[in-house]
Amino acid sequence: MDIVQIVSLGLVATVLIVLLKEQKSSIAFLLLIFTALLIFISVLDHVKYIFTLLHYIAEQAQVEAVYLKTILKIIGIAYITEFGAQLIRDAGLGALASKVELAGKLFILMLAIPIITALIETILDFIPVAAG
């Protein structure tokens, strides 16, 4: 599915959701979730291509696989968290959406700790130790 089809699907779904919202709000919300999932599934091939390209670039740059995997997990958590939080916010539950975003940020921080540690160790290796 190309971008024109995705945008067209989104516009058609929007019109239907707005029309259904006042009389059949539960069906409107289900249509919203279905449309969002359909769009998400339609871009998965593109996401796979991007991950393959990033993996190739990391191999060429001789970046350790553990760092690339961690970064890709962080990106995945960020996108999934944002996707879920937007759906929750669309349901009118902004407070719950904020909690989902907080949880996503905490998971990202947890995954980033080894990278931050390696970065600090690398920086400390460049700083000369004062002879005492």
Image (tube, rainbow, N blue to C red):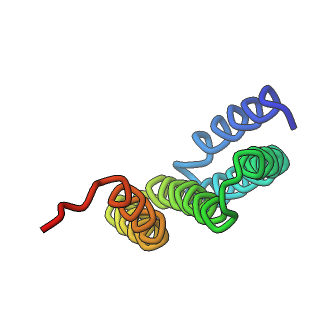
Q: Is residue 17 left or right of residue 108?
A: right
37 or 49, nearer to the observer: 49
Q: Position of residue 34 (x, y in %)?
A: 72, 57
Q: Is residue 75 above or below residue 19?
A: below
Q: Residue furthest top?
A: 4
Q: Residue at x 65, y 35 (%)?
A: 15
Q: Residue at x 68, y 51 (%)?
A: 36
130 or 1, nearer to the observer: 130
Quarter the N terminus occupies: top right
Q: Is residue 50 above or below residue 116?
A: above
Q: Residue at x 72, y 56 (%)?
A: 37
Using the rendered image of the protein, determine whether residue 36 is visible from the camera's viewpoint. yes
Name which quarter of the figure residue 3 lies in.
Answer: top right
Q: Is residue 106 above or below residue 56?
A: below
Q: Residue at x 44, y 55 (%)?
A: 89
Using the rendered image of the protein, determine whether residue 100 is visible from the camera's viewpoint. no
Q: Is residue 12 left or right of residue 92?
A: right
Q: Residue furthest left?
A: 132
Quarter the C terminus occupies: bottom left
Q: Position of residue 111 (x, y in %)?
A: 49, 70
Q: Position of residue 20 (x, y in %)?
A: 62, 47
Q: Position of residue 23 (x, y in %)?
A: 56, 52
